[in-house]
Image (cartoon, rainbow, N blue to C red):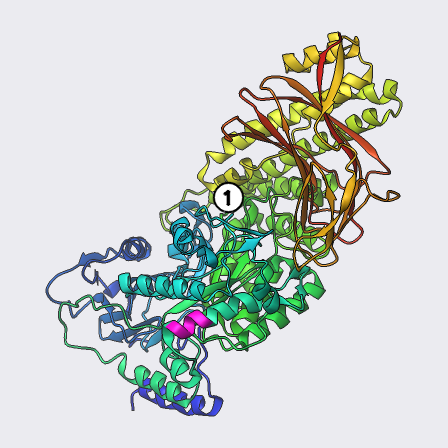
Amino acid sequence: MRADLFLAYFLLFSLLVSGRVEAGSTWWKPERVPGSARLSLAAVRSIYLPTEPSARLEGAVEDFVACWPTDLARVQGASVPSKQVLVLLRDDRIEGFSYRRDRTRVTLRAATDEALADGLYAICRELLGARWYWAGDLGFEIVGERMDKFPDRVWRERPAFVQRTLYPVNTDFGRRNGLNRKYSFNHNLARIFTPEVYMASPEVFAEIGGQRQVPKGNAGRDAQPDFTEPKAVELAVRAVREHFQKKPESNSFSLSINDNSLFDEGAETEAVVSPVEYFRGRPNYTDLVFGFMNEVATRVYGPRDDGLRMADSGCKEGGKVHGWKNILSSVCRLLTADKQPAPHLPTSPAPPAQPSYLTALAYYTTEQSPSFQLHPRVMPVLTSDRAQWHDPAYRAQDKALIQRWADSGAERIATWDYYFGAPYPYPRQFTQWIGESIPFLHQSGVDVFFSQLPSIWGLDGPKAWLTAELLRDPKQDVAALLGEYYANFFGPAAAPIREFYEIAEQTRNEREGPANWIKFYKDEAGIELFTPEVLARMRACLDLAIAQARQGPLISAAASGGRLDAQRYLARVRIVSEAFSYTEFYAAYHRSRVRLVELAMAVLRGERPEVVGAGLPSALADFQQTKSSFDELKRSLAEHPMHGGFKTFNRLMQTDPMPLVMAAFGRSGLNLEALDLLEDAALLTTLRAWNTDELELIHFGRNAELEHSGTKRRNFLGPELPVINGWEIQYRASEGLQVEAARGQEASGLSIENADIVSLAQTYPVIGEKTYLLQIDASWQVSPDNRSRVQLDWKSMSGENLRVDLLLRLPNGNSDGSQSLQFLLSAPVNAYDLQVAVVANRQYEGDFLEIERIELGRHVPKR
């Protein structure tokens, strides 16, 4: 009996006993055993390509030929060569890919060009020792000993995850490491519930604050539709059907919520959401949104029928197998998939039949699992920052959540993790949690993976390659993979480089604190995780790595496959060192900014101005120097392809301390004539006149003391909010949110605790190019990752946005009582309106923001 037939029958028996096919298993992998009957790699002299190969397959063939030990000829034509050839055939019966040898002909079969490319890279990986640890040629390495024989048995492999996305995936690294993207699930409702739809059917749009929300076609800002309105279901069903009619080959359509928490506040919505429950501090809208998803899916696919629908999908794309009928179907495929047709020119068959899904992000306010079973064709996409698994409570909660979704009735489950990388300006290492979470997701039945990882290769280290390996086969030993990465990629510098990344990971685990949504994402103060002492230890590791890489044995270009020069280890260490210099320079810049802000606030508090004020010039000079150095470095690194991810951090708005510092100089009593550090001539003129009492300050605006005129409950979520004439309060509901009068006051000021985000704002009339003084009296407790801030939005008479200024991200820690914050502002040309907003954002236990007074004034000559 043929060995593969015997294997198939044995598998059938095993499956009938276990009731399950293990997705992602490798049924056979080459063994390093001698055998004269095996085909020599050198005996294969050509590679046969199918008609019209995709760009992905072309790239894989190019890499494959470059790795092959002998010259390979590319063949395409009317007949398939029978000898000394590797034949690539499209075969829609195959899941993953399959290799089979017949004398000197080796056939690689797969349903798609993507899987054919994966099969080629499997040979590069398993037989030739090729690795692409990073993007580009610098990421290439040959490890171990090349094998010189082809396997003499059927080799079948199917990745554990049918989708393996590290966005962006359309890169050489993605192709070489088997990354792909199959399903669509981005925020999409704004493309369905459009301004044109509003004109015809305004009733399907959310009512918030008593007003129907007019859409702008913006997935970030448009409110969610009214999910309880039957016509909303009809419109969604129509959009789904139109999509699949136009694109019958499509396997998914996204009905994911817009990227905000703006939900309808009507009675029907309240009835579904009430009694209001909270999950991870946010109100739970899961049943509302996924109830809508079930309604749409039922209209599109018919009522849920677990047996029928799961049988339909069990053998598609590595889907979960349910029941003995699917087990038999899988084995029948195994018995027939490698029957070779007579040699002929293969055609390009139509895409294989596959189930389609309606996808929906289980995102922010919809993270919690539903209280009911899902329609099998609804694909939930679980969003989670599993870097936060350093928090044991969050880790346990997240594992339980994954299991609940796995039991929800969904036929296929996806995950959207947050593996950044950029825009974090430091090594955000969490390989421990990657190594634990991916196998757990796989064991729970999740087989669609997506994460953004715009890599900064020097800072992100092994994250991308380790993730790609585990998505292909999560049973691999994580410690062995990491050991391979460091030893093979950095050679003699492996030990200090590994210590460098392990210090970064240990620092995160020990200092990041309680979990929160993508913690420190786009937070300018997140760098404070890394103390100067920790940064110095990490730099010492890199200095040692450079020294060891220089002293290591030179490797010839021939030994490295002719792809790299002999100094490749040193070149890689230098990439890490350059990237880390960004971290160091930014840390120095941020420390100087914090010191400057602290001194300015001390001056404004009146603390020994003759001493504190005297320190301002040196603190300002230090700030200007570190900022200049950082700006120069970030410009130069962003041009290097291995450091391109820094561009995302470079674009982030940062606190500009100068308006605060200018006001402090005005109060410092220093001789401004002797200073050459103040570059804004108009503000400097104002300061000089201010100090000589040539100007007086005229205040305008409304209700600077924040006096209340009652309270109002805005919606069923609560809480009761003060009504402060002249001021607008915007907020996102959160568990335990308190917005009330300032402490010790009956009906004035504002105290905010347990806020996800709460904004207090007023819009003032202004004149372009004039100088203004903004004063805010406040006190606070700010934990790391709390982004409470003072922000300005300048607009023209036509409403055009002229500029947004971040005046201050409140410094971490406690203000130790009331702090007078003053900012000297210079209005941009054509300014007409200025919105001043004080924002409490991401407050932790014990945090608060208390605002006593906000006043805007303009300096005018004394009469």
Residue 12 versus residue 300 in the image, above or below: below
**Residue 700 in picture, x, y percent from top left:** 71, 24
- In the image, 394 versus 767, the foreground residue is 767
Mark 1: which amino acid?
A: Arg
Callout 1: helix, strand or loop?
helix
Q: Residue at x 53, y 49 (%)?
A: 490
Q: Quick check: 456 above or below 506? A: above
Neighbour tally class for label 1: few under 14, some 14-19, many 20 plus, Cα within 10 Å: many
- The quadrant in which the C terminus is found is top right
Does residue 160 appear in the picture of this structure? Answer: no
Does the magenta-highlighted stretch encompass residue 298? yes
Q: Residue at x 87, y 18 (%)?
A: 610
Q: Which residue is mark 1?
A: 572
Q: Which residues are magenta?
A: 295-299
Q: Residue 313 or 502: which is nearer the viewer?
A: 313
Residue 703 in sight here = yes
Residue 825 among magenta residues: no
In this rendering, would 628 be left or right of 464?
A: right
Left or right side of 20 for 35: left
Residue 722 coordinates in the image, percent (x, y)? 75, 46
